[in-house]
Amino acid sequence: MIVLPGCSNQDEKENYPIYEGTVVFKTDENDKYKFLVLQHISKENLENGHLEDFIKLAQDQEASYYFVDKENYEAIEVGQRVKITADFNQQESLPPIRTVVSIEKINE
């Protein structure tokens, strides 16, 4: 008899990874909405930076693109701190692309 460990879908949903950071860039292409979120960014870099600068900063910290729905895309602005629960799957790129399960604004 072989016993294989496993977990139910319920357990998996409760253990999604959670990330916090600042939305530094927003884009929508073909009705696909995404944010670039960096864990750490100075106010000066945020205000003066361009996408290429953000990508360079992303390589030295926890950073990712996140697919979001249109409602969150329109409700969350660049510069907003967010807490994101993401799906386990991600597209391999630098930075990676993840899908949002839930997102909430962090008021500081």
Image (tube, helix red, strand yellow):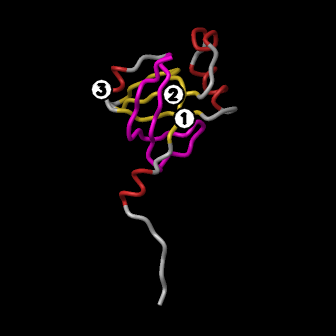
Residue occupying the far left of the picture: 71
Q: Is residue 27 above or below residue 44?
A: below
Residue type at mark 1: give it: Ser
Q: CA distance from mark 1 to mark 3?
A: 20 Å
Residue occupying the far front of the picture: 108
Crowdedness near tag 3: few (<14), some (14–19) or many (≥20) residues, C-alpha within 10 Å: few
Residue 48, image x, y percentages? 60, 9
- Residue at the image position 47 percent from the left and 26 percent from the top: 82
Crowdedness near tag 1: few (<14), some (14–19) or many (≥20) residues, C-alpha within 10 Å: many
Q: CA distance from mark 3 to mark 2?
A: 16 Å
Q: Tell me whether circle 1 and circle 3 mark residues in contact (CB < 8 Å).
A: no
Residue occupying the far bottom of the picture: 1
Mark 3 lies on residue: 71
Query: In the rendered structure, which disc, 3 or 2, sits on the residue that comes first in sequence?
Result: 2
Q: In the shown orientation, is residue 60 left or right of residue 5?
A: right
Mark 1 lies on residue: 64
Q: Does residue 84 show up magenta in the picture?
A: yes
- Residue at the image position 45 percent from the left and 69 percent from the top: 6
Q: What segment is highlighted magenta in the picture?
A: 79-108
Query: In the rendered structure, which disc, 2 or 1, sits on the residue that comes first in sequence?
Result: 2
Q: Tell me whether circle 2 and circle 1 mark residues in contact (CB < 8 Å).
A: yes
Q: Secondary structure at mark 3?
A: helix
Mark 2 lies on residue: 36
